Amino acid sequence: MATAASAGPDHLFNLRNYFYLGAYQAAINCSDSLPSLSPEESVEKDCLVFRSYIALGSYALVINEIDDAAATPLQAVKMLALYLSSPGNKETVISSLKEWLADPAIGNNPILKLIAGTIFMHEKDYIEALKHTNAGGTMELHALNIQIFLQMNRSDYAEKQLRIMQQADEDHTLTQLANAWLDLAVGGSKIQEAYLIFQDFSEKYQTTGLILNGKAVCCMHMGNFDEAETLLLEALNKASCFSKLVIPSLVDLLP
């Protein structure tokens, strides 16, 4: 995600990484010990925290805590919570979402576009999702584009998006994750490379369901089913209801 790192220390670096890697409770806990933030940083922090609560299934908390006076990015996050909280909310949320996206005053907000892409991808309306995400602009939007293209079985387009991310920041957590997703989709000798990426994450950061699932799928590709079973059982203890919305369905990447 784009930040003005040159203006000073990136106070949200650890919070973002926890979120990207599926350590949602750690992200929430981390937010309590941050130093004074700028107004923009505060909104980004709140978005990440509320998205973490969504990932943990705490939809009502998010819906109740974000009021109508909140900034556009937070309103977008609330929309996601409403969408996920009940199938009966789906039509209303999608209708409101389209109205917001058509509003020139707020329609280009990166978080709004990210939430729109996430919801439309969940609806399997990939063309509508890409209409709002394809221009990119943040690392999260590029990563979401890769997820969408992989769902569409267009690894060629996903590879182009990955190259953009690598040119922007090859070592970024989302770039590495996206690289692993693409390696899994391509298969063959790339599976070992994907495994090494997930292994590197597990050595650098706390182990999460996302990392364990990634390693397990690699093991299944390589025929190591006993290790895969062990990893999947461990992942079940760290399961998140939001996994399918923030990463591509890894099981779909099996041969």
Image (spheres, grey):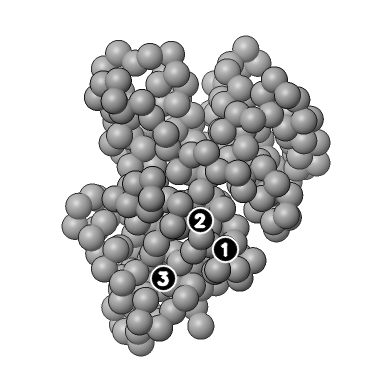
Q: In this view, does 190 lie to the left or right of 115?
A: left
Query: Do callouts 3 and 1 mark residues in contact (Cβ within 8 Å)?
Result: no
Q: How far apart are marks 3 and 1 (CA)?
A: 13 Å
Three-letter amino acid code of the residue under disc 1? Tyr
What residue is rendered at 30% in x and 13% in y?
Answer: 36
Q: Read off the residue under disc 2.
A: 161
Q: Residues within 10 Å of mark 1 (few under 14, many from 20)?
A: some
73 relative to 190, above or below: above
Q: Read off the residue under disc 3.
A: 183
Closer to the chain start, of discs 3 and 1, is 1
Q: Is residue 170 left or right of residue 140?
A: left
What is the secondary structure assignment of the residue under circle 3? helix
What residue is rendered at 38% in x and 50% in y?
Answer: 167
Kindly tell me whether residue 190 is visible in this rendering.
yes
What residue is rendered at 30% in x and 63% in y?
Answer: 198
The spot of residue 118 in percent (x, y) is: 61, 47
Closer to the chain start, of discs 2 and 3, is 2
Query: Do callouts 1 and 2 mark residues in contact (Cβ within 8 Å)?
Result: yes
Three-letter amino acid code of the residue under disc 3? Asp
